[in-house]
Amino acid sequence: MWGRVPLNTTSVYRHIYFGKQPEHDIAGPPPYQKFATADEPSTTQKSLAMYALTLSAELAGVTNLRPQDTQENNFFYTFKVQCTSCRETHPNPIAVNRFENNEMSGSRGEANFVWKCKNCKRESSATIKAAPTPYEQTEPAKAQKIIEFDCRGLEFTEFLPEGEWLVDGIDSNTKFEGVELTEGEWFDYDEKAGEEVSIKDLKWDIVRA
Ligand SMILES: [Zn+2]
C-alpha cells in the first residue's frame, strides 16, 4: 500500500510505502514526485516554439540588407499576432523591440513582448533570440533567415517591414541608410559605382525554426 505524506508546507509530497516493499522497488530509493505549486501552473504552461522570419528579395548592386537595430537605435519588428488558445487575432499590428523586457505574470520571467488576449484572457509572450542576420544578394534570390524568435501561446502571422533598413553597395561598399521597404521596393543611385541600385520582389515568411 502506498501513501502520500507531506514533506513541508509547499505541497511537496513524498510517496512512502507502507508494508512489504514491492519487488521492482527494492534496488532503488522510493519514488517521489514534486507537485505543482501556485507559481507553477503546470496545466496552463504553454509550450515554447521557435520560429524564423525569412526574406527573399531581388537585390541589384547592393547586399547586406538588415534592419537598423542597435542598442542605441532600437528597431521595432512589426507583426500581426494571433492567440493560439482561442485563435483571436490582435486588432492592431504589434511592435517587438529585442532590447525591451517585460515581466510575465506569476514569476515566469521576462519576454520582449507580453500579450494578454482580450478574448480568452490568457497571457502569451515572444522573444527575439539574437541580432538580425543581414540578407546577402544572391542570384537567383533565395529565402534567408533574418531573425529567430520564440513564442509561447501566440503566433506571428505576418511581418510588416516598418522602420529603417541599411544596405551596402556590393563593390563600392557605399552605405545606404534610412532604406524604407514598406512600399515593397526601393531604388537609389550609387555615385561611387555609377549605377542604379534596387531592392525588389520582397517576400517575407514566418517558418518553424
Ligand atoms: Zn485568446
Image (spheres, rainbow, N blue to C red):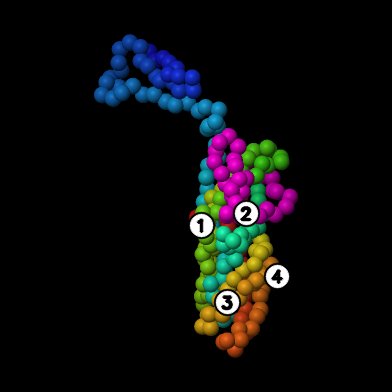
Q: Earlier in the sequence, mark 4 or mark 2?
A: 2
| Secondary element at tag 1 | loop
Q: CA distance from mark 4 to mark 1?
A: 27 Å
- Mark 3 sits on what residue? 175
Crowd class of label 3 (few under 14; some 14 to 19; many from 20; radius 10 Å)? few
Give the residues drawn in magenta, as a range: 85-114
Disc 4 CB within 8 Å of nearest ligand 1 atom: no
Seen at 66% across and 78% down, the residue is 187
Q: Earlier in the sequence, mark 4 or mark 3?
A: 3
Q: Is the residue 115 above or below the residue 137 in the image?
A: above
In reply to whether residue 93 is colored magenta, the answer given is yes
- Mark 4 sits on what residue? 183
Percent x, y for residue 23? 28, 19
- Mark 2 sits on what residue? 96
- Mark 1 sits on what residue? 130
Q: CA distance from mark 2 to mark 3?
A: 26 Å
Mark 2: which amino acid? Val
